[in-house]
Amino acid sequence: MTILSDVETLQDVAALLADLPQADTDAIEAARARQNTLTKPPGSLGRLEELAEFMAGWQGAERPVITKAQALVFAGNHGVCAKGVNPFPQEVTAQMVANFEHGGAAINQLCRASGAELSVVALDLDRPTADLSEAEAMSEAETLEALKRGAQAVDPEVQVLILGEMGIGNSTVAAALAFAAFGGEAEDWVGRGTGSDKAGRALKAQVVDQGVKLHAGKRGLQMLAALGGREQAAICGAVLQARAQSIPVLLDGYICTAAIAPLYDAAPAALDHCLVGHSSAEPGHARILQAIDKEPILTMRMALGEGSGAALALGVLKAALECHNGMATFAEAGVSDA
């Protein structure tokens, strides 16, 4: 059963955000105490120690493990593409989904390397959302359907969930969500996407500005419906389902992180179980990370999407747990502890 099984309105979804599971503080303290007995100067493994403590909190165990990891890539199409905001046709979304399914994309290789099981969920690709600059992108019913499909895709047996996306035009959607959630100017949030030139970026900024002004005043999940897409809503649904089961989440780059901006807008603590896998080369991503106060695990100048940066970061997360669980204590190793 998913956390969203019985919800009938977006207001019902928002109400769930007030009663989400929390990290186990006793497990965090126990993991921290173990770190301080391992054969190393305290704090010398830096972020690796913090990641081990984070995982301990959400697994409720002093020695957390990752025996099964899931990567979910959600794909959707967007009506805003009618404004010419993307240099590629929308047919590419379905073509790339086929490439994922046949194992030919970067995310397939990175999941194999990091040991994650990949699933791709195509969301009504033959039915793009409405143009967000002219109308609400999705109705409440469409938004709820996508939220629920995202939640249903989460495997309850995994110890970590990787989230990614695919959708021609969704860098424009990401910019609109980020602008609506965090303010500034439309130009602050618009990058190259899949290869827009200077004129293309100017057009994207104009369309984003028009859409955000059209839907001004809509917050939280209403913002998601007005400006988002099906893959963004599915990402939000997967984040909520993972939280209901205390499964940590590795978010990908700009588009994936912008997708959860409506959840942050509604309840910032709803993202406490989320890590950000990498800092995207898209300039808006650094702004979002600053706004939601999250430090990326990696900085690799990537801007691919697909969950690629998050899948790569899984290797670091696993390494953190190998050190945490496998290192000897000073007593076990017979090493003097000053």
Image (cartoon, rainbow, N blue to C red):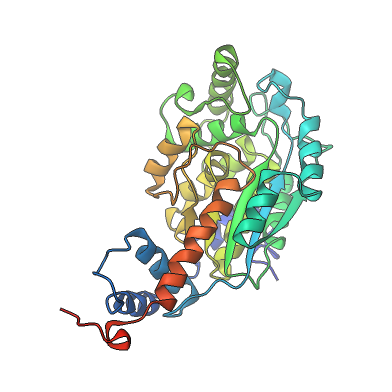
- x then y, percent, for residue 188: 44, 26
What is the quadrant of residue 30 in the picture? bottom left
- In this view, the residue in front, 184 or 60, is 60
Q: Is residue 9 above or below residue 70?
A: above
Q: Spot the residue most to the left.
A: 338
- In this view, the residue in front, 171 or 37, is 37
Q: Is residue 18 visible?
A: no
- x then y, percent, for residue 38: 31, 77
Q: Residue at x 48, y 41 (%)?
A: 300
Q: Is residue 13 left or right of residue 127?
A: left
Q: Residue at x 71, y 60 (%)?
A: 153
- In this view, the residue in front, 16 or 275, is 275
- x then y, percent, for residue 26: 36, 79
Q: Spot the residue most to the top.
A: 199
Q: How many marks?
A: 0
Q: Residue at x 52, y 30 (%)?
A: 216
Q: Residue at x 80, y 50 (%)?
A: 101
Name the image quarter holding the C terminus: bottom left
Q: Is residue 114 above or below residue 258?
A: below
Q: Spot the residue most to the front.
A: 334
